[in-house]
């Protein structure tokens, strides 16, 4: 009887092992959901769709982008935090969802450190300070700051929502320049850019992918870049730092995360594929032309960046007393 039971147990193990190996070895074996926690048209959405198309071609399964906007990215983030950790749900996270939101939202049902497995940093994206040229005559940062100081609260700036990267970047700008401007939050960067072009708001400080096309077409005017170095794709736009705001640095960053507990072989495979894509001759020039710097690294390096940025921007939010209504 003991020998019979032992044979049954060994047979069960023999059957289970190949199934386990196949589950990890053949990933992905069905469509992968790529959650974007914002509406279409912003940098997060643009980068996610570009990467999803490349990953679909490389891995032979659909990578389906799903926009789940709302509450500064917290709704979509919650969806991913609660998803099965099997590699078939990932999220294009960014500075707002992973580093800023913990200091803005006190009752999150998830933790941006323990609820997610960092996979790969995709890109670092400097913000571009842009104005509607029909509403503002300012042609550089000094002129904008002078205007804002003369009329505190008269100028309005848009963002993709309360607590979004553009919102926090403008909080940093106001703090650094001693200015006061009215914040107008939108449900996504796309609608905000439409209203900036239409003249409903005066300016914004947002990422290169949604900002550069209307700059190049003359619909908006670029005054400065938020990084310490000029963009290689737009070297004629000076940095904000070199225009009387020394040391100003407020860049965005974007990367894939998966639910905590996602098997390491899947994380490593996705990291390797993304790194290959981002370093390739097709994706790198495309992103650089849109003002994004492809910046792949290890999952551990991405985790360290999230932790450091969470501390940095959390301090700004506390000192500036930023509230989410």
Image: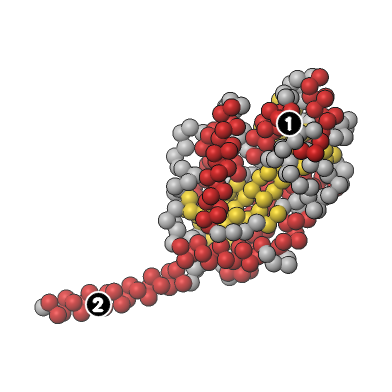
Which residue is the site of mark 1? 157
Q: Which structural element holds mark 2?
A: helix
Question: Could you tell me how many numbered marks the image carries?
Answer: 2
Q: Which structural element holds mark 1?
A: strand
Task: Tell which residue pokes out farthest to the front in this image.
Answer: 246
Specify few, some or many for label 2: CA neighbours under 10 Å numbering under 14, 14-19, or 20 or more: few
Residue 325 horizontal side relative to residue 49, left or right: left
Which residue is the site of mark 2? 10
Task: Tell which residue pokes out farthest to the left in this image.
Answer: 1
Residue closest to the eye, 314 or 90: 314
Instruction: Examine the rendered structure and indicate whether residue 277 appears above or below residue 76.
Output: below
Q: What is the quadrant of residue 56 in the picture?
A: bottom right
Q: Residue at x 44, y 68 (%)?
A: 24
Q: Which residue is drawn at 66% across and 45% down?
A: 252
Residue closest to the eye, 271 or 175: 175
Tell which circle, 1 or 2, labels the residue nearer the N-terminal end.
2
């Amino acid at each position: 009887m003991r020998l019979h039971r032992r044979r049954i147990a060994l047979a069960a193990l023999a059957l289970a092992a190949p199934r386990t190996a196949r589950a990890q070895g053949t990933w992905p074996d069905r469509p992968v959901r790529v959650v974007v926690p914002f509406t279409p048209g912003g940098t997060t959405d643009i980068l996610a769709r570009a990467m999803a198309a490349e990953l679909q071609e490389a891995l032979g399964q659909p990578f389906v982008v799903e926009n789940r906007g709302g509450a500064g990215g917290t709704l979509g983030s919650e969806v991913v935090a609660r998803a099965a950790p099997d590699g078939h749900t990932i999220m294009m996270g960014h500075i707002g969802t992973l580093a800023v939101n913990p200091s803005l939202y006190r009752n999150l049902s998830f933790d941006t450190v323990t609820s997610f497995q960092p996979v790969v940093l995709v890109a670092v994206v400097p913000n571009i300070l842009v104005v509607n040229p029909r509403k503002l005559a300012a042609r550089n940062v000094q002129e904008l700051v002078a205007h804002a100081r003369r009329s505190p609260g008269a100028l309005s700036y848009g963002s993709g929502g309360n607590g979004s990267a553009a919102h926090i970047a403008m909080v940093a700008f106001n703090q650094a320049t001693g200015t006061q401007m009215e914040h107008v939050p939108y449900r996504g960067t796309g609608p905000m850019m439409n209203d900036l072009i239409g003249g409903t708001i005066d300016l914004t400080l947002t990422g290169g992918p949604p900002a550069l096309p209307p700059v190049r077409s003359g619909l908006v005017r670029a005054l400065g870049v938020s990084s310490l170095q000029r963009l290689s794709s737009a070297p004629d736009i000076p940095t904000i730092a070199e225009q009387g705001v020394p040391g100003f640095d407020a860049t965005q960053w974007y990367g894939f995360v998966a639910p905590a507990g996602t098997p390491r072989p899947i994380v490593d495979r996705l990291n390797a594929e993304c790194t290959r894509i981002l370093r390739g001759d097709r994706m790198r020039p495309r992103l650089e032309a849109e003002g994004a710097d492809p910046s792949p690294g290890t999952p551990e390096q991405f985790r360290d960046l999230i932790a450091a940025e969470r501390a940095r921007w959390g301090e700004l939010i506390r000192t500036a007393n930023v509230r989410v209504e």
